[in-house]
Amino acid sequence: MNETSESHPIWEPNGQAAAPSAVQGLGFQIGQRVHAVGNPRRIGTVRYVGAVEGYAGDWVGVDWDDGEGKHDGSLGGVRYFSGSGHSSGSFVRPKNLSAGISFLEGLHLRYRGDSTKEEEDEMYVYSTSQKRVSIEFVGKNKIQEKLNHFKELIGASVSNLGVSSVEPFNEINAIVPNLKELDLTGNLLSRWQDIGTLCEGLPALEILNLTNNLMSCDIPKLPSLASIRVLVLNNCSITWNLVEKLQESLPVIEELHLMENKIRTIGPEASNFVKGFDSLRLLNLEENSIDSWHEILKLSYLRSLEELHLSGNKLKHISYPFDHKRPDIPNDYDKQDTSIRPFENLQILLLGSNEIDDLASIDSLNLFPRLMDIRLSENPIVDPTKGGLPRFVLIARLAKIKMLNGSEVESKIFEQFRYVRLVMAKMQLDDMEEIKRVHPRFIELKALHGIADEKPPSGMAGPQKMSSGLICITLKCVGASMGEKPPLTKKLPPTTTVGKLKVLCESFFKLKDIRLKLLIQEEGSPFPLLLDDDMAPLVDLGVGTGATILVGEES
């Protein structure tokens, strides 16, 4: 949400714009962050202060963050304010709202001796991998003792306590001078001046989490964040322009998390590329609204970037700027080095839950110099139900892949075998130009594994020609209750589905009342792979002539 009056105009009950003096009073101001008394997790923004027609007394119009109000700011035909949703607004008596507490008040409240179990569960910090880690160094049986020794505290959480302000930096430093990790998730903070004061009072602070604080886009004076290595600004209404402004205040930043900020564009003001952030190793832009890969290319010369998280955006196509030369080579590079490559140190690229649907995007990942860990799940191109690629094809097409969709890729031999056979079964091998275009790695992998062409003898016609289109596979029973049965070699249409093959196996081996499962075993692969999609044709699974299918039974 934007706190400016342009996006959320303030109205008098008569429908006219309200004067500033008319919208302040009762201890609350327009744009102020508040929470419901007794429930610091129920947070909203003040959008109106004053009378409500037909109701006695004064009211505060609140636009609730969770969208759970009663109206959109209009009541009885009179518009008092414009809510962010059709039912995000409500009118509340001032006595039922809280303007919050200060940082040190929150710290004492969280770590007081008579803390509840729920409050103790909140005593955690975020690790650099963004996992909650309990603050065991406080010692839950020694909390009262540690209250007198806050100087020993090196990590703390005051999340969801309604913190809205901070004390002077010298008071903060006198209480917790050694704090290195601080979680301020879900509070009422909005002013960057307060964050600057906080960091000035905490010179050792390295990890700061401001998730779910609606931060202002106005920075009258840059805060000092000189020691911050990890900054979490998830769901803080952050724009990229604000990130650019903060860059000067973050000289040693290594991780920057910007999830759920509705970011659509990455707009460096003075260049086509994002500059600075020389120590930035991880950038998290998940769950935003980026729909153009052109925006991502603006990040391609972040010198230390190793991890780029882009899951949950709206990207349809990705590419590597193979011939893209940077126009402004930094002065500290060797002038003779003209081979500075985009995304030179990128190793991890998370692209899950986007809208990628083309093979060129997949193949372009091979051009990233050091990319080894890729997430592509929940994209159309990898959804077999929508004609997408199965996992074994992805592994075969991606030359340097070591992690795919969060799972380690231990050996590629089996997948590469299947992929080559899949291509051989589905394409005319005499059209090599078309194969190079659609399957860039096919020739390389075919030669690597010494897989010979399978060409039928010439001059065939009629039934012989029809049979030449069949694949010859070996079926072996391996189920414990199936008994000793000799292997069978069968010729089948490559379009035979897994489900149909199960039915045929029941007939071939005279199996009754057994739920079958099929696994493919090919030379060079240490483990068989389960064929678990009954609707998938054998050819789409890379099953070709010479393949061995193991017939097992469901446990």
Image (cartoon, rainbow, N blue to C red):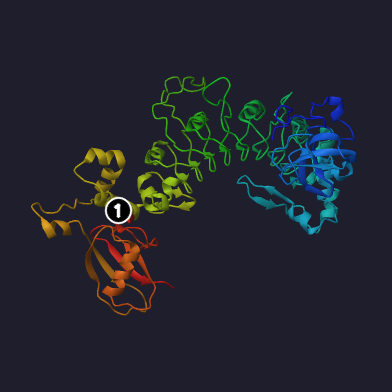
The answer to whether 382 is drawn above or below residue 243 in the figure is: below
Residue plotted at (33% across, 59% down): 525
The answer to whether 77 is drawn above or below residue 521 in the figure is: above
Amino acid type shown at disc 1? Phe
- Is 174 or 450 nearer to us in this picture? 450
The answer to whether 425 is drawn above or below residue 73 in the figure is: below
- Is 151 or 541 nearer to us in this picture? 541
Image quadrant assignment for residue 164: top right
Image quadrant assignment for residue 437: top left
Residue ranking furthest to the right: 57
Q: How many labels does the image show?
A: 1
Q: How many C-alpha atoms fall within 10 Å of the one at disc 1: few (<14), some, or many (≥20)?
A: many
Q: What element carries label 1?
A: helix
Could you tell me residue 259's position as x and y percent? 61, 40
In the displayed structure, does residue 98 sit left or right of residue 438? right
Image quadrant assignment for residue 223: top right
Could you tell me residue 187's position as x and y percent? 76, 42
Residue ranking furthest to the front: 77
Q: Visible in this render: residue 449?
A: no
- In the rendered image, the quadrant that contains the N terminus is top right
Query: Which residue is labeled 1 in the image?
Result: 417
Could you tell me residue 325's position as x and y percent? 43, 23
- In the rendered image, the quadrant that contains the C terminus is bottom left
In the displayed structure, does residue 351 sit left or right of residue 397? right
- Is 3 or 130 nearer to us in this picture? 3
Could you tell me residue 381's position as x and y percent? 42, 45
In the displayed structure, does residue 42 sit left or right of residue 253? right
- Is 37 or 531 nearer to us in this picture? 37
Residue plotted at (49% across, 41% down): 349
Q: Visible in this render: residue 62?
A: yes
